[in-house]
Amino acid sequence: MTNTGGGGPRPRGTWWREAAITATAFALCLFGGVVQVNEKPLSPPTATAYLIAVVSCAVLPVRHRTPLAAIAVTTVCGMLVAPLGLLLSPLIVAPAVITAYSLAVRTDRRAASAVLLTSTALLVASTLPFGTNSWEDASRLGLVAAFPLAAGVLGHSAQNRRAYLAAVEERAQRAEESRDSEARRRVAEERVRIARELHDLVAHQITLANAQATVAAHLFDARPEQTRKSLKELVETTGDALDDLRATVGLLRQSGDAAEPVEPAPGLSRLPTLLESFRRAGLEVSVHQEGTARPLPPGVDLTAYRIVQEALTNVTKHAGTGSARVRLAWNRDRVTITVSDDGGGARTVPTASTGPSASTTVDRPPGYGLIGMRERATAVGGHLSAGRRPEGGFVVSTELPLPHTKDTTRSTDGATTTEEGRMADGATGDGRTGGGEAGDAP
């Protein structure tokens, strides 16, 4: 048997309500003790009536904590009404009716029903030896039995109502917690996405600016004209970086959607412009394309562009070589992008005192380049791998899915197109710690 009532302290307003209920039950029970049959005039309550009323109502304040004990006491008091010479009526069993309601509210349905039926049967049975078996007595006993049972039905309804409201409140709370959890998850994902976008937008320009500034410092005394050219390109590169940063921050700070269409996201169509920026930094890049190029979805197109950008940025920062190769292989269901170089494993910076071939090793903390590229490839359903080449250097390879198409025509084997960049004086390099993963980067 389960008691669903609470046993903690009750609010101040509840005590006033309990006092009013107890006083009302006492008055009804005492009035029922003076009611007589055969239309006899009412007389003052006897000591027996006071005793029954006091004992029955004394247990009402504790019916919430111990409903079984309360219903037992009120039932026993009701059973003593007839033997003590009083008339068993619905009024005198008012405390039993109240405890029956409380029992039904706070106790299991089956157990409460069994207790109420037993209590009602005992009340009726206690009157049978003292009754006259008239229709009047039968109707009165029917009312005595009906009132506790009706109170039990109302109590069960109240219990169901409370259980329903508790379930609704619990579901609402769980839904709110789920919304909060989903909001936190989306905020975390958005923070990672913003960090990745800022890294790809700014790190590329800053890396090129660093390479151009290094070349300018190296050639400052020996070749002033080349120094001026490097400084001019440095100004253009930093200006582009500021424009990209300003545009990105502006999008993040606006409260609603943009009033005017923003610039389309970059894709492989802007690859020549990207290669030109690396040419100004002194990196020669060759592009080999195999198969028939096809339009890419915007997300895949942006991912392909960013991976090429970040891979070439790592070559400029870490490879220690002045050239790199980009290969695009188009198949029926995927495009494979490979960026490789023949660089060494140390970060080299030219020194003005010993000439272009001299270098000084510079330690750099691990970055997030490879991590960001992997996240981008995985987000569009692709795969990325990176590591040292057996013949030397480093390679970054990714496979990105292509949309299904009815055109299955492939270009002939060996059909390639090559775009050669130019190499400026000066070289930069390192091993691939930009990924921040020891297994993929020297």
Image (cartoon, grey):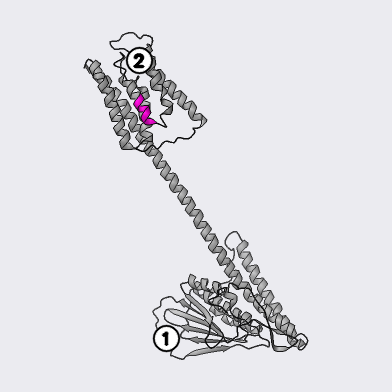
Position of residue 341 in the picture relative to residue 411 (left or right): right
**Residue 146 lies in the magenta-colored region:** no
Place of residue 343 in the rendered image (x, y in percent of width and height, measured from the top left) = 60, 86
Q: Nearer the viewer, residue 362 or 282?
A: 362
Which residue sits at x=31%, y=35%? 111
Q: Which residue is mark 1?
A: 410
- Neighbourhood count class around disc 2 (C-alpha, 10 Å): few under 14, some 14–19, many 20 upward: many
Disc 1 element: loop
Which residue sits at x=29%, y=12%? 37
Question: Is 77 placed above or below 304 here?
Answer: above
Q: Which residue is mark 2?
A: 33
Q: Main secondary structure of the magenta part?
A: helix
**Residue 71 lies in the magenta-colored region:** yes
Position of residue 238 in the picture relative to residue 366 (left or right): right
Question: Is 93 placed above or below 184 here?
Answer: above
The amino acid at mark 2 is Gly
- The quarter of the rendered structure image containing the C terminus is bottom right
- The quarter of the rendered structure image containing the N terminus is top left
Q: Is residue 298 visible?
A: no
Q: Residue furthest bottom?
A: 414
The amino acid at mark 1 is Arg
Q: Is residue 120 visible?
A: yes
Q: How many marks?
A: 2
- Tell me the CA gap for discs 1 and 2: 105 Å
Task: Please state the extent of the stretch shown in magenta in the rendering.
Answer: 66-73
Place of residue 175 in the rendered image (x, y in percent of width and height, measured from the top left) = 46, 51
Place of residue 42 in the rendered image (x, y in percent of width and height, measured from the top left) = 35, 9
Q: Nearer the viewer, residue 45 or 138?
A: 45
Which residue sits at x=43%, y=48%? 171
Q: Residue furthest right?
A: 221
Q: Are marks 1 and 2 in contact (CB under 8 Å)?
A: no
